[in-house]
Amino acid sequence: MSVVGVRSEALLALARRLSSVAGELRDEADALAAGLARCRSPGLAGGPALLGAWVRVESDAVRAVGPAGLWGEALALDALAVRLRLAARAYEEVEQWAGAVLAAVRVGADGLGRGGLLTDAGALPVVSAVAPTWDARPFDGPADLVALGRGLDGGHVRVVELAAPDGGSAWVVAVPGTQEWSPRAGPNPFDLTSDVRSVTGGATLAAAGVAAALEAAQPPGDDGPVLLVGHSQGGILAAALASDAGFRSRHRVTHVVTTGSPVGVFAVPGSVRVLSVEHADDPVPTLDLTPDPGRPTWLTLRAGEGPATDVRRHALDEYVRTVRAAAGAPRGTVPGLGAWEVSAHRFLHRPVRSVTEVVLERGWQNPRP
């Protein structure tokens, strides 16, 4: 299990910091050299012992200032900063290429949309309450949050209300993955159309429907924290909602959990703690051609060695096992996971107050092309 997090801006920021530290080291070296120059050798008048001690001081100072000391360390940091800038430039070129590819996909989807494919224009979300099928119990760790996505076939979305430590409520929303693969949008919005539209930055009825499901469960005015969890397309939609300022103005999103999802392309704000889990041999998380951000509030866990592709590793149950193994490992084995769990204390080990389950469908206003 490895922790992944690198983007060009992160590399550039580190390069700038290293250059700054190198400058500080050179300033310290100059100050030490100037101080040494102001001091005079005691010469023979001080006696052999004093002169010998002074020679040792001068020698130590020269070593501290010279190539083996502060100046050498500064040069090494400068060299590392240069390499980081070169790496950042390479990453930036890759990111620009990825952006161009996604833009081309979006243009292609728009063209197909005029022919009635990969579009749900003119549709409205229809949300119907159904009896919950989940066996309500507290979430003992992140694996239980991931497992909440089981049994959501047929366009189901699940919202769990928890008793928060402050006496209020906390909310967990489970979003399903792709369920239909036809390029023509049908009643179930968790389909190929939503996949393409969401990962290329478009608005989707599926995301609007997930928001409607939460609003159906959460009383007006409730300001409880919200955790969005999704597998595959569900993670895409969770990240899309978390990056939507309008959605965040209505709901206090504090956490996102994604498994097997290409979510690096989404501008989720730093105020939201993201846990993104990927299998190295699962090709789906890389479909957005964009690495996840490298920042303290975004933790990407990558399991396996790769690069061989095994589509079976994309299954939700495979990710449940991976997350359970990571959370059950000795503390500190998976860097950052323990801190993420602490940050999610409002959602873990808390009593369940209610479970709301809905079926989300597309409702068409006008005849379809």
Image: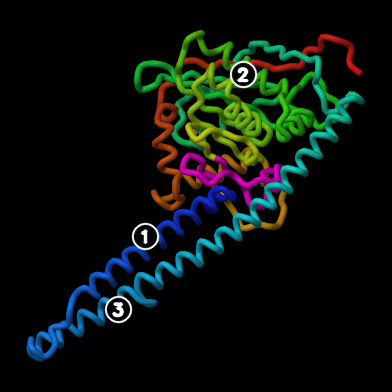
The three-letter code of the residue at mark 2 reads: Ala
- Residue at image position (78%, 12%) is 363
Disc 2 secondary structure class? helix
Disc 3 secondary structure class? helix
The label nearer to you, 2 versus 3, is 3
Residue 287 lies within the magenta run: yes
Q: In x, y percent, where is residue 204?
A: 72, 24
- Residue at image position (81%, 12%) is 364
Measure the C-alpha gap from mark 2 to mark 3: 66 Å
- Pointer 1 and pointer 2: residues touching (CB < 8 Å)? no
How busy is the neighbourhood of tag 1: few (under 14 within 10 Å), some, or many (20 plus)? some
Q: Provide the residue designation for mark 3.
A: 62
- Residue at image position (61%, 16%) is 213
Mark sitting on residue 24: 1
Query: Which quarter of the rendered picture does the C terminus lie within?
Result: top right
The label nearer to you, 1 versus 2, is 1
Measure the C-alpha gap from mark 1 to mark 2: 50 Å
